[in-house]
Image: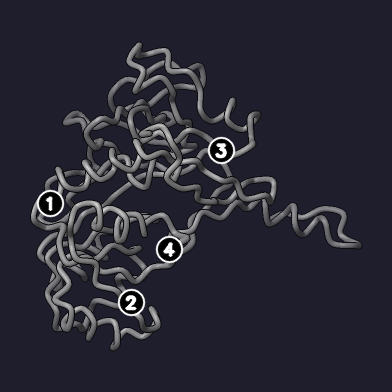
Amino acid sequence: ALANLAYIIYTSGTTGQPKGVMLTQHNVLYYLHALTSQLGDKYRNIDFSSNYCFDLSVTTTLCPLLAGQTVCVYEGDILDAAAFRAHLSAANVGFVKTTPSLAMALLPGSDAQVDALMLGGEALTEQAIAALSDHVNAIFDEYGPTEATVGAMLAQAYPRLHQGIGKAYPNVNLHVLSESLQPMPIGAPGELYISGLGVARGYLNRPELNAERFIDNPFSHDPAHSKLYKTGDLARFLDNGDLVYLGRNDEQVKIRGYRVELGEIAAAIVNQQGVQNAVV
């Protein structure tokens, strides 16, 4: 039963066709264990204010319910900062997960003191950490594509425990590789590949894309690590094992936490009558 699908979530594709990522029951249990083992008693009274089509809602609905935690549903407009701050106080919210840009719009000026703020979806700056640290007891920066079940690694950004985007969750291995799939030396940049219990079954009905992005893992004979997910992200390891994110090796950009493929936009423009070529 653990191999059965738990959900399919769609994310952007370079061809203009969103691709459905297939996540199993086993994937969800991996992520639940990762959250509860890393966050401990900071994972309680969990705010749910995001669109459930965004995979951070797995952190704020599915996992808390499986862990027997309270979900504090916010029914207002997410752009109404005053109403959101009132919700934090009224519901005694202890854990909020959002993007850095939304946190910066909502939390400064709040009287509520949130125990743990988890940020993801886009780069976390030092300015954001400084501005948000007055309103929370701890700030965590989570990295991970949908194809690796929401998150693959965590950094505690305040009070600072990690550099960059931190270290892998339990049961996940991170590989920084060259174009010929050779491990890069510590400090040297390469493409990040992920293996382990978080790696999805693949994309729904996209065998060619699966062959390109979910490749056989030459570094392990463990069935749980049989596949490497090719992230398209560039990274390098620090001496202490923390990972530093360096950017993309393609045209993908992040806007308020959403993956946007510039090639997808260009393809849509070229499909318009009278347009011969487009650059985005």
Label 3 vs label 4: CA separation? Answer: 19 Å
Label 2 vs label 1: CA separation? Answer: 22 Å
Q: Which one is earlier in the sequence, the residue at label 2 or at label 3?
A: 2
Label 2 vs label 3: CA separation? Answer: 34 Å
On residue 203, the disc is 3
Q: Nearer the viewer, mark 1 or mark 4?
A: 4
On-image quarter of the N terminus: top left
Residue found at x 8% / y 55%: 41
- Residue wearing tag 4: 52
Q: Mark 2 touching mark 3, by CB under 8 A? A: no
On-image quarter of the C terminus: bottom right
- Residue wearing tag 2: 105
User: Which residue is more in the foreground, 25 or 106?
Assistant: 25
- Residue wearing tag 1: 160
Label 1 vs label 4: CA separation? Answer: 30 Å
Q: Position of residue 92 (x, y in %)?
A: 13, 76
Q: Mark 3 touching mark 1, by CB under 8 A? A: no
Q: Residues within 10 Å of mark 4 (few under 14, many from 20)?
A: few
Which amino acid lies under the numbered mark 3 shown in the image of this protein?
Tyr
Q: Nearer the viewer, mark 2 or mark 4?
A: 4
